[in-house]
Image (cartoon, helix red, strand yellow):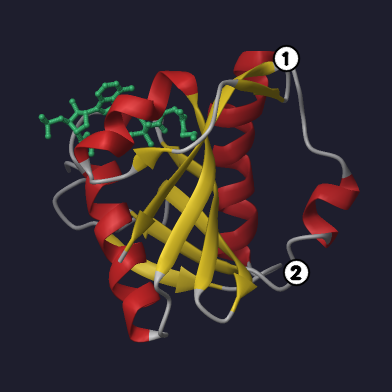
């Protein structure tokens, strides 16, 4: 069966089973390709974040994003990863819409984050703007991006 045909967009909580499935996807997409892994502290510091996922009907994690509340009107988007087998199939764009819809419902007016240079054109298509010079994070080039909802 095509895992995309019955995918669902869900919220999940820190430390539940969906969280750890999403962590495995994050390792695969965001850490292993740059020769890094997570440490225990990386999980502890995100205890209070909100988590968004796309899961297949067989409960595989296809995509994940986290939201860190910086203040009552601003979220920082973090840890956005789409499964390599399903990148460029539209899931990333759907995840951003799901995320923005929830942000608006909660009174969030601004979304900001540090985007990997390679992903900047993806975010620009979704209305996000580059607002910084290039800088290094996890030793790879990034730009700060933001959008007013
Ligand atoms: C970047 C990422 C989140 C985008 O998700 P995705 O599911 O692949 O993107 P979509 O299929 O929804 O693409 C939406 C549009 O953006 C375009 N796009 C996607 N990734 C792109 C990229 N890296 N560069 C240029 N355009 C891109 C698509 O072609 C599509 O364009 P269209 O609407 O004209 O057809 C995903 O590819 C990913 O996980 N990449 C590796 C990890 C990463 O870079 N995460 C972000 C860290 S800041």
Residue 116 appears anywhere in the view = yes
Which residue is the site of mark 2?
A: 47
Quadrant placement of the C terminus: bottom left
- Residue 8, position as x, y percentages in the image: 27, 63
> How many numbered marks have been drawn onto this rendered protein structure?
2
The circle drawn on residue 18 is none
Locate residue 136, reporting x and y percent: 68, 21
Look at the picture and state if 125 lies above or below 5.
above
**Residue at the bottom extreme of this rendering:** 106
How many residues crowd mark 1 within 10 Å: few (<14), some (14–19), many (20+)?
Answer: few
SS for dot 1: loop
Measure the alpha-carbon separation of dots 1 and 2.
Answer: 25 Å
Near-viewer residue (29 or 77): 77
Q: Quadrant of ligand 1?
A: top left
Q: Residue at x 54, y 39 (%)?
A: 25
**Residue in the image at 73% along x and 62% along y:** 46
Residue count near mark 2 (Cα–Cα under 10 Å), binned few <14, some 14–19, many ≥20? few
CB at disc 2 and ligand 1 closer than 8 Å: no
Q: Position of residue 144 (x, y in %)?
A: 53, 38
Q: Position of residue 60 (x, y in %)?
A: 42, 49
Which label sits on residue 35?
A: 1
Name the residue nearer the viewer: 128 or 48.
Answer: 128
> Quadrant of residue 67 in the image?
bottom right
**Cβ atoms under marks 1 and 2 closer than 8 Å:** no
């Amino acid at each position: 069966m095509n895992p995309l045909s019955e995918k669902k967009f869900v919220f999940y909580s820190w430390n539940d089973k969906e969280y750890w499935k999403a962590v495995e996807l994050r390792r695969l997409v965001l850490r292993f390709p740059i020769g890094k892994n997570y440490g225990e502290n990386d999980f502890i510091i995100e205890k209070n974040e909100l988590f968004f996922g796309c899961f297949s009907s067989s409960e595989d994690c296809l995509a994940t994003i986290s939201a860190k509340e910086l203040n009552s009107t601003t979220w920082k988007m973090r840890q956005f990863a789409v499964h390599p087998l399903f990148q460029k199939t539209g899931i990333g764009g759907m995840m951003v819409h799901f995320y923005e819809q929830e942000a608006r419902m909660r009174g969030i007016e601004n979304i900001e984050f540090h985007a990997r240079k390679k992903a900047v054109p993806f975010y620009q298509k979704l209305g996000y703007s580059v607002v910084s010079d290039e800088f290094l994070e996890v030793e790879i080039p990034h730009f700060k991006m933001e959008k007013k909802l």
